[in-house]
Image (tube, rainbow, N blue to C red):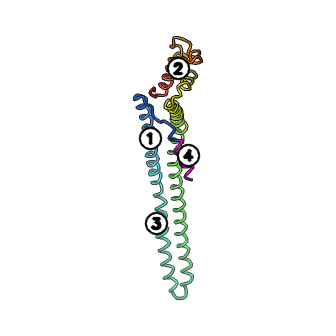
């Protein structure tokens, strides 16, 4: 278990979630705060919707209270009726039907309450789950993708693997960026032109929002 936890920490520590460039880092922080605000907003909406639906259980509560009162009243009356000579037994049986009617009201009230509570629960779950799923398929993949690529670029930079950074620049920089070089950057990279290699590496790091060496 400890080994698994350690490997997870090692994996996440290799990522870089925020850029070195202040402007890009600020935009990333704002995007993360907006994501948190989005979740908080929908949690509050879900709570409000749940509370609104739960107000619909009032009729069920009324049925339950009325049924309990009716059942108790007829139970007491039936108990007293059985003490009446001669007709007490039959009278008690008749009053027991009223007690059963009270129990039916209680059951109906509980059924309505359960239906309302179930609806309120699943409505709240849906109002939270759908917006969170939206974040999981839009915002989160972008953040993880950046963190992986920026983390890999940082490791190459910190370990002095400039040639690999330059190669990344060759394969990912836009044609417009590559056209700014006075000579063919691919040829210069193959010929180990250190000035071009350094420039390619620096421009690639810049696209990730990272500072140069």
**What SS does tag 1 mark?**
helix
Which badge, 3 or 2, comes first in the chain's sequence?
A: 3
**Could you give the CA–CA distance between mark 4 and mark 2, rounded to whole angstroms?**
34 Å
Q: Main secondary structure of the magenta part?
A: helix
- In this view, the residue farthest toward the top is 182
Which badge, 1 or 2, comes first in the chain's sequence?
A: 1
Q: Which residue is mark 3?
A: 65
Q: Nearer the viewer, residue 26 or 54?
A: 26
Q: Nearer the viewer, residue 126 or 211?
A: 211
Which of pointers 3 and 1 indicates the residue nearer the eye? Answer: 1
Which badge, 3 or 1, comes first in the chain's sequence?
A: 1
Mark 4, other Cα within 10 Å: few <14 / some 14–19 / many ≥20: few
Q: Which mark is residue 7?
A: 4
Q: Nearer the viewer, residue 6 or 35?
A: 6
User: Which residues are the magenta region?
Assistant: 1-11
Residue 88 placement, left or right of 18: right
Q: Which mark is residue 36?
A: 1
Which of pointers 1 and 2 indicates the residue nearer the eye? Answer: 2
Q: Position of residue 195 (x, y in %)?
A: 50, 17
Q: Position of residue 32 (x, y in %)?
A: 44, 37
Q: Position of residue 12 (x, y in %)?
A: 52, 41
Which of pointers 4 and 2 indicates the residue nearer the eye? Answer: 2
């Amino acid at each position: 278990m400890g080994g698994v936890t350690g490997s997870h920490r090692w994996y996440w520590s290799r990522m870089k979630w925020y850029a070195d460039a202040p402007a890009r880092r600020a935009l990333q922080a704002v995007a993360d705060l907006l994501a948190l605000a989005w979740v908080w907003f929908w949690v509050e909406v879900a709570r409000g919707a749940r509370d609104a639906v739960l107000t619909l259980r009032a009729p069920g509560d009324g049925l339950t209270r009325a049924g309990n009162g009716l059942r108790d009243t007829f139970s007491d009356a039936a108990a007293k009726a059985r003490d009446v000579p001669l007709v007490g037994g039959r009278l008690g049986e008749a009053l027991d039907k009223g007690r059963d009617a009270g129990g039916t009201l209680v059951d109906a009230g509980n059924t309505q309450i359960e239906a309302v509570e179930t609806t309120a629960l699943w409505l709240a779950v849906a109002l939270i789950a759908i917006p969170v799923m939206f974040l999981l398929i839009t915002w989160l993949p972008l953040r993880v993708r950046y963190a992986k690529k920026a983390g890999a670029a940082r490791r190459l930079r910190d370990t002095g693997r400039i040639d690999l950074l330059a190669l990344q620049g060759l394969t990912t920089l836009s044609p417009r960026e590559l056209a700014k070089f006075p000579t063919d950057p691919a040829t210069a990279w193959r010929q180990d032109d250190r000035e071009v290699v350094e420039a390619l590496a620096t421009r690639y790091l810049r696209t990730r929002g990272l500072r140069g060496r």
